[in-house]
Amino acid sequence: MSGIWVWVELSDGKAAPVSVEALGAGRALADELGTELSALVFGQGVEEAAEAAIHHGADQVYACDDATLADCRSEPHAALVSQLAAEHEPIAILAGATASGRDVLALAAVDLEAGLIPDCTGLAVEDGAIRATRPVYAGKLMSNVYADGDTMLASLRSRAFPAPEADAARSGEVINIQPAMAAGDISVEVLGLEASAGEVSLADAGIIVSGGRGVAGPEGFEPVRKLASTLGAALGASRAAVDAGWIPYARQVGQTGKTVSPDLYVAAGISGAIQHLAGMRTSKVIVAINKDPEAPIFKLAQYGIVADLFKMVPALTAELKKRL
Amino acid sequence: MLRIVVCVKAVPDPKEAGRIRIDPVSRALVRADLPLVLNPLDKNAMEAALELKEQFDAHLSVLSMGPPPAESVVTECLALGADQGYLLSDRALAGADAYATAYTLAKGIEKIGPADLVLCGRASSDGSTEWVGPELATLLDIPIVTMVKEIVECTGEWWKVKASLDNGYRVVRVKLPAVLTVTRELNIPRTLSFSGIIQARRKQITQWGIDDLDVPEEAVGLKGSPTIVSEMTTRESKRDVEMISGTREEMAERLIQELADAGFLSSS
């Protein structure tokens, strides 16, 4: 067994940010274990992405350029991952914990009868074995997991690992391979894709400004939205605001929504229910603005302001604008 | 007849998650005193199944794996309108990871009989690996669509659904039999009715152990789990909060200055 592998998720021919982070994490593991890092780059028109994977740390790339792999369907991707892994027996296969990354790893894990570790926020080598750390029970506990078996599969949480700088001087080998499934054998067909264009994706956002029950209505999100756009941040929400119908579910941060770890999380009018904290606990800096000085969110925050968000949030936006 | 199996999990009440702690001596998770409830997203899977049952001639089985007290969530699903309830319960099943859970559920589904549609919540509120659905599909050798937020067409062999992605969604066609995992957006789960509760009393829950499933002890539970949890640690989440006070303008200036000093405003 040798080698660390990273399954690279492509969108519009480019690696997803979390895949680049996974290449960085994989590089560190490979160096520590004295082995090679391989990137798996499957899709349609993969040449540039294969080159970029090398610049981001891969020693070699298994590239498969085929129409069946264009839209990240889990079946053909996983079939190819398992086929390659059965042949080469890598130590670990990493992928971003995105919708597609999770599915591809889960399907491959069954084929490989391999241990699967979800949503890792830390990876380390201990006595020659890889130890993965992941938050469980709404992030209250950290679980250290080891895989027992041959190849270990792990999905990595977005923004939990630093993205490596691209180094155009790096070189490596691109090995072109054939797909493992024929188009007619795939029982899922993608008819269309609807991306929430123009807005910063929550998982990839460096800064998130969220509103909760305290915004008191759909129009109450306006000041929160203004602060977010002034900060160049993504807009988030608590479950209470989503359930009330003030903002779409896609914006929900929390246990039944998205899990995020931005550098800065601004919670406006969010009390800090455990299920919300589960989704944003790993944010590096948390700012809480709430009328209620007893709100649980203050226990997690680094900076707290007890104030009416409708007055405080516009004041922050105004102060920011002064500096632009 | 459309044969539907909904897989559900009994989880410690998420509202009580604040009470979960680690025993300082044994380092084991103390959650025995937490009430078990139906995993929130499994309610959406149940609701989808019930709506399909209202629309078509369908038979709805509900399947769970867990300790004997997990029977309560199966009963709840029967009260909601499921036709038959199954609980896979055996000492040997304890400690299962996502893979061993999917393996056991797959054996249960095979024993129940062929299913056209298997529905699961996208994730459980306690383990939240989101892997049981896809692993189950692979073990049953049928396709999977995860994070289904809308069932657009549900007639014939190919169904059309909308499945969420991290930033948007896609419209996919999937060939039945298939496993679908569902998100909260799919529907608003109904609440229990009094008549449903009365009717559930007349429905039997079938309990199967590993002998009934004809699976070896090594393939299930902790022994059949390829991941090993070595230890749990409490997250040091205690931060020192700095409360900012003063006039509104002073507070705004102070906070923005702190954020600027920390480098957050560098790009602007």
Image: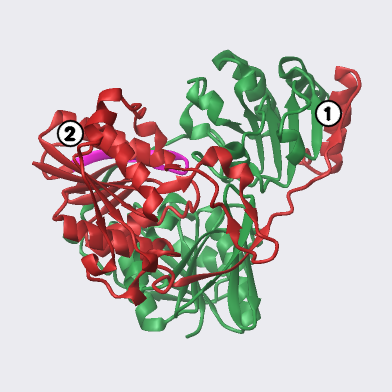
Chain colours: A green, B red
Q: Give the Cα separation between the discs numbered 1 and 2.
A: 59 Å
Secondary structure beneath label 2: helix
Q: Residue at x 70, y 28 (%)?
A: A230
Q: Quadrant of the C terminus of chain B?
A: top right
- Tag 1 residue: A323
Q: Seen in the image, is A147 located left or right of residue A131?
A: left
**Chain letter of the residue carrying label 1:** A
Q: Residue at x 37, y 41 (%)?
A: B42
Q: Amino acid at mark 1?
A: Arg
Percent across and percent down for residue A79 are 30, 67
Percent across and percent down for residue A69 are 32, 58
Q: Residue at x 23, y 66 (%)?
A: B213
Q: Nearer the viewer, residue A194 or B1?
A: B1
**Chain letter of the residue carrying label 2:** B
Residue range in magenta is B159-170
The reply to whether the magenta stretch includes residue B158 is no
User: From the viewer's perspective, is residue A28 above or below residue A249?
Assistant: below
> Residue B136 falls in which quadrant of the image?
bottom left
Within 10 angstroms of label 1, few (less than 14), some, or many (20 or more) residues? few
Instruction: Please tell me whether mark 1 or mark 2 is closer to you in this view.
Output: 2
Residue A193 visible, this orientation: no
What number is the disc on residue B53? 2
User: From the viewer's perspective, is residue A262 above or below residue A171?
Assistant: above
Q: Amino acid at mark 2?
A: Lys
User: From the viewer's perspective, is residue A279 above or below residue A219?
Assistant: below
